Image (cartoon, grey):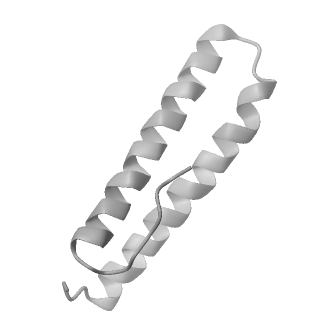
Amino acid sequence: MRDLTPGEMLSLREMLTAETTGLVSLKTMQPLISDQKLKSACESGIQTAEARIRSMQQFLQENQVVSLGEVQ
């Protein structure tokens, strides 16, 4: 198990919260977008946010910080 400082734990929590909030917003807005270029940018943003969240989850699991499920 890796020991993270309280500041590191807080940073990870805040990053996960920001990414999750952004992902929810993008997924909520996506059906409302009619412009194809904007829709494509939104889809790209969703994929990128999901990848960043998975990366943070992997870090947490590999360092036995906490046990998490996958992004869905």
At x 39%, y 44%, the residue is 51
Q: Quadrant of residue 20?
A: bottom right
Front residue of this view, candidates 72 and 55: 72
Q: Which residue lies most toward the top here?
A: 36
What is the total number of numbered labels drawn onto the structure image? 0
Residue farthest toward the left in the current orientation of the protein: 2
Residue 63: % across, % down? 22, 75
Above or below, comparing residue 62 to residue 46 in the picture: below
The spot of residue 53 in percent (x, y) is 43, 54
Indicate the position of residue 72 as horizontal and vertical percent values. 56, 49
Work out whether residue 16 or residue 59 is closer to the camera in this orientation and state it.
59
Q: Quadrant of residue 38?
A: top right
Say which residue appears at 27% left-offset and 65% top-offset.
59
Residue at x 39% of width, y 76% of height: 67
Where is residue 65, by image quadrant?
Answer: bottom left
* Residue at x 32%, y 54% (from the top left corner): 55
| 50 sits left or right of 58 in the view | right
The answer to whether residue 1 is above or below residue 49 is below
Residue 3: x, y in percent? 21, 89
For the residue pair 38 and 2, the one nearer the viewer reads as 2
Question: Looking at the figure, which quarter contains the N terminus?
Answer: bottom left
Location of residue 56 with respect to 7 vertically, above or below: above
Considering only vertical position in the picture, is 8 above or below 70? below
Horizontal relation, residue 61 to residue 37: left or right? left
| Residue that extends furthest to the right in the rendered view of this protein | 32
Closest to the observer, 44 or 54: 54
